[in-house]
Image (tube, grey):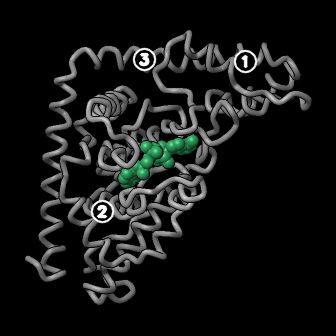
Amino acid sequence: MKKIMLSGVKPTGRSHIGNYFGAMKQFVDLQDEYESYIFIADYHALTTLQDAEELAENSLNVALDYLAIGLDPQKTTLFKQSDVPEVCELAWIFNCLTTVPYLERAHAYKDAVAKGKEVSVGTFDYPMLMAADILIQDSDVVPVGADQKQHVEYARDTAEKFNRVFDKAKVGDFSQSFKLPTALILENVKTILGIDGQKMSKSYGNVIPLFIGDEEIRRLVMSIVTDSGSGLPKNVFAIHSLFRDQKSLEALYEEKQGKYQHLKEALIADLTIFMKPLRAKREVLARDKNVVREILKIGGARARARAAKKMELVRRKIGIS
Ligand code: TYM
């Protein structure tokens, strides 16, 4: 029997090369090895995106992105988080086991507080909904970028806590309610940097989106911040390393030392070659959105059936069945 992989992307904007190399490429590379469940985290997106039209449109876009990068709906169950409403029920149950000080230690929450934001309860509770996503499908592995590592650890801790409280589980006991998931993080791409040298993030406005055309590639590469002095434009180099092997990249940057314009042109050329087939595939898929909706519908039903079964066990364990 194959082990189970699960992961998701929030539909809060266009997918970018940080999402792709940090996480989404892994979904494709691992879909044969694992029984895979990949979803669109629309309930999580609601913590920051509160516009019905935009959320619906972005969600369909993420589905198109998944298909365009090569997720095969015959192999991978593709679905929308909101088609599995049981996750909200499970998140509530986890809320009752989780303490406030424990959630206060979450990086994302602490960052929001540090920035002086008025944090919603949903943002504070984000890790428990994510734990529910992961644990309700009995996931073994969760491919993600480094910024989600702590969230997967929260899921693991929550599984252990539930098992301790409701199963009275002992170490090495395999009859426990929840499996303990592991994050899959690829060391060399765990944090992709944006055009300003900070972590690439939709909320920082420093992304290179996937599927962009030649003009946008040129405009974004030209706006990569280069530091003067060292001769090595390290922000250009960091992004370029995603599209070329280390050896040929080092040779190029050695040869063209200090010639920033030339190096940016080389990156434009490599990015253009990378984007072209992805964009073409996405354009074809985008012609018939009903096919995409149908794929999500089938995936949603499958994911929900599994979740419903799991919830029967959970309700029995806590005494409300
Ligand atoms: P999201 O939508 O922010 O990002 C999707 C995936 O892309 C990765 N990522 C990056 N990796 C490397 N470098 C970067 N600059 C970079 N930016 C983003 C993220 O680590 C992520 O893997 N909370 C999740 C969505 C989610 C989820 C889940 C994931 C909800 N429930 C259950 C896994 C399992 C999120 O906001 O990802």
Q: Is residue 58 left or right of residue 315?
A: right
Q: Could you tell me the amino acid type at mark 1?
A: Lys
Name the element at disc 1.
helix
Which residue is label 2 attached to? 132
Q: Earlier in the sequence, mark 2 or mark 3?
A: 2
Residue with the mark numbered 1: 264
Query: Looking at the image, is 107 positioned above or below residue 230?
Result: below
Q: Which mark is residue 279?
A: 3
Q: Residues within 10 Å of mark 1 (few under 14, many from 20)?
A: many
* Callout 3 touching callout 1 (CB < 8 Å): no
**Residue 73 in view, yes or no:** yes
What is the distance, in whole Å, between disc 2 and disc 3 at their CAs?
34 Å
At 64% across and 16% down in the image, what residue appears? 268
Q: Is residue 264 left or right of residue 256?
A: left
CA gap, disc 3 to disc 1? 21 Å
Helix, strand or loop for disc 2 = helix
User: Which residue is depicted at the point 67% across and 40% down?
Assistant: 198
- In this rendering, the answer to whether 3 lies above or below 255 is below
Ranked by sequence position, the earlier of labels 2 and 1 is 2
